[in-house]
Every structure is written in structure tokens, then in C-alpha cells.
Image: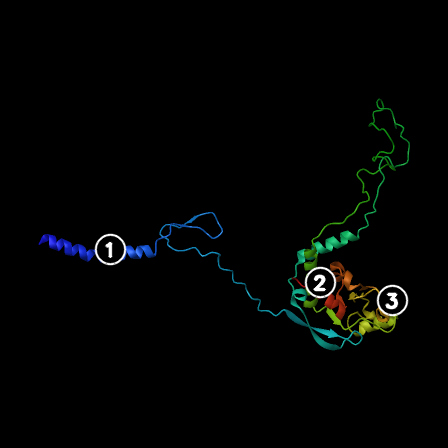
Amino acid sequence: MQSIKRAAGLALRLPQARALSTGAAQAPPPSVLRPIGSRRKVALSAGEVGTLSWPPPQAVRAVDPLPETIQAWMMDFETNNPLEILDVQRSVFAAPIRTDLVHRAVTYERNMKRQGTHNSRTRSEVRGSTRKVQPQKGTGAARHGTRRAPQFVGGAKAHGPVPRSHETGLQRKVWLAALRSVLSAKYTQDQLVIVDNLEIESHSTGELSRLLQANGWCPLASTQKPASIMMLPLMGAEQPNGLRNLELASRNIGGISLMNACDAEVYEILRHEFLIMDRNALDLLQGILRPL
């Protein structure tokens, strides 16, 4: 009887054992993982069972809720009346204002304009005799070998300036970011004026001065305040008569500068109060300054 009970109990336990062994064969716990394309083995931490997802999931990119363009008025240069509303690039005229980059760009541009022609004469260049001034010993005074020494009046200059270049380097991306900052500051302070064109019919200085005063860009003569206007048209090799008249009329007005949009500078825009540019200059600057 006892042998029959043992056999029956063994028969009952065998299916359970087979089921456990079958489940273990279906999902064996991995001991070492190897990423795709890597020879390094990555061991699982204690008590962790799973698979390594490779390649890792891509990061979710944030979407800018602001539109790509902002609006600006295009005015008539002679009457200062609004003509239409333009959509200008936010990345150019509403960029973050980086004063540190503006300072670097201004320093770079002003160093480029320094002539560097300063010079002082050395002992070999000063005119005079090379005779020993006094005996070496016996006089009780200091030893001197020539009157052309720096300590004498009319002598040479010790470690004086020599002709050299003051140019410094600046990355182009930094300069472009500084130009965006200056244009954004002008737009924010309502000192940016976009006109259809800057052509005028007469080359008279008085008429241009009255036009600027009537439009509110130039202070009246009674206030005795200087003008501060930067006009930025796009001028080609062959200038039309209207731009030629503007160039002639603005020469004799203090505080008014005229510069080609292709040669725009951070310092020149920054040191003037108003910036007046035409439609062609606007398209050019947006094409150059728009980040990739």
C-alpha cells in the first residue's frame, strides 16, 4: 500500500514540475546585455530583469509658440504716412539683446579704423653727437655716454609707440549676433523707420532738413539740438538720381550719416538715434542675418 501511495504522489507532482520547467525556458533571466554595434557588455543590476532598448528614444523638441514674423509699418519717406504693414523676421528684429556681444563688435570695428601710424624716434634716430658727455669718473655725477639718451631734453623716447596694426579678430557669428541685437534694440525703442525708398527729387540741403524736421526725425533748429539719423539705403554700382540727390543733400547736415546697406556697421547704427532703411535694405539684412 505504501508503494502505491508513493507512485500516485509522484505522478501528481510531475505535471507541476514540467509546467515550471516550461515557464523557465520561455523567459530566461538575461545575465549580460550587449548593445547593438558595441563590444562592451552591460551587466544588469541586482534584482533587475529586462531588455535594453537601443537606440535610445529621441528627445522631444520644444515648439516655439511665437510666430516667426512680427509686424512693422512701412512709411513714406517724404510725408511719413503709413503705406502698408510688413512682416519682418522675429529672429532679426526681435532677437535677444546681447550687450556683451555688442561691446565686442564695437571694439572690433573701432580697432579696425585705427590708423596705427604713431611713431617715436629711438636713440639711433635722434640727431646729435655720440661724444661722451663727461668723463666716466671724477665728476661726482651720474655716468652718461650720449646726449641722445631718453633722460635728456631732446633725447630719444624709451619704449615709445611704433607703427603697427590695431586690428583684432572676431568670429563672424558673433558680429552677426551683435548686429541683430542692435536692430532689435532699434525696433524695440521705436527708432527703426522702414520706408519704401529714400530717393528725393532735389539735392537741396535745406529741403532735406525741412523734410526731416517735419517728419519728427530731426529736432527743430530752435532747440539747437544736433540731429542723429542713420540712413541705410541699398546702393548699387549705378545709383539712381534720387539716391544721388540724397547723398549730396545730406553732406552738409551735422549728425546725419548715409551708408550703404552692404556696409552696415554695428557702431554706426548704435551711435545714431534713428535708423531709416528702405525696402531693399530690409530684404538684404533679413537674408544675411536670418539664422539657419
What residue is disc 1 on?
Answer: 17
Q: Secondary structure at mark 1?
A: helix
* Kind of residue indicated by mark 1: Ala
Q: Position of residue 267 (x, y in %)?
A: 75, 58
Q: CA distance from mark 2 to mark 3?
A: 29 Å
The circle on residue 225 is: none
Q: Residues within 10 Å of mark 2 (few under 14, many from 20)?
A: few
What residue is disc 2 on?
Answer: 288
Closer to us: mark 1 or mark 3? Answer: 1
The circle on residue 248 is: 3
Q: CA distance from mark 2 to mark 1?
A: 76 Å
Where, quadrant-wise, is the N terminus in this rendering? bottom left
* Kind of residue indicated by mark 2: Ile
Q: Position of residue 59 (x, y in %)?
A: 51, 60
* Residue at image point 71% right, 60% down: 179
Q: Position of residue 38 (x, y in %)?
A: 48, 49
